[in-house]
Amino acid sequence: MKTLKLIIAGIILFASANTMQAQVSVNVNIGSPPAWGPAGYSNVDYYYLPDVQAYYDIRATQFIYFGGGKWIRSRNLPNQYRNYNLYNGYKVVLNDYHGSRPYSNFNSHKVKYYKGYKGKPQKSIGSHRSNYKKVYKSNGNHGKGNQGGKGNNGHGNGKH
């Protein structure tokens, strides 16, 4: 009888340990920075990408860019940046902003962090090779982004 109770207790303990481990794993992965994000930062909600004049919302895993007269949230960059290399492009870490509209500071950001801006050297969190296809997928639905006539100013047309 004692053996049966011990076996049942062991099964319950084993099952509950697996459940708790799965819950912790899910919570840790929500809002994780992308593999192409700069290493060494915590408690950050947004990156500003000067080369494409867009933001990346880490928690929502979405890009935010201006197109068609409004700010658009999308899992992918606009079509004209489909070849943009997120690993090589500079990311400005906005560690002082935690609201829901980082673009409210866009006029300041685009002047301070102009296209081609390079701050201190950055190392990516993950490997470029393992995530290449996942990162560069483009969403063709928003190809009208950046209608200001500037085009892509030479960025994103080739391999970097």
Image (cartoon, rainbow, N blue to C red):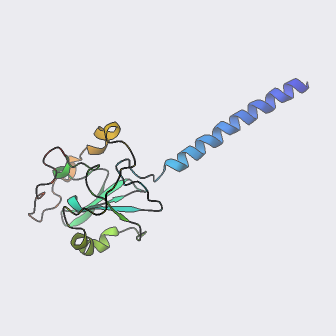
x, y percent for residue 141: 21, 50
- Quadrant location of residue 145? bottom left
Name the outermost residue toward the right.
Answer: 1
Q: Nearer the viewer, residue 146 or 136?
A: 136
**Label total for image:** 0
Measured as percent of width and height from the top left, residue 35 is found at: 38, 47
Query: Residue 130, percent across and down?
Result: 35, 37
Q: Nearer the viewer, residue 45 or 86?
A: 86
Residue in the image at 45% along x and 51% along y: 32
Residue placed farthest to the left in the image? 149
Residue at the front extreme of this rendering:
121
The x and y percentages for residue 30 are: 48, 51
Q: Is residue 159 left or right of residue 10?
A: left
- Up-down relation of residue 121 to residue 131 (above or below): below
Residue at figure coordinates x 59%, y 41% from the top left: 22
Q: Viewer-proximal residue, 57 or 127?
A: 127
Q: Please state, as top left, top right, bottom left or bottom right, where the N terminus lies in the image.
A: top right
Residue occupying the point 10% across, 58% down: 151
For the point 25% across and 52% down, the residue is 77
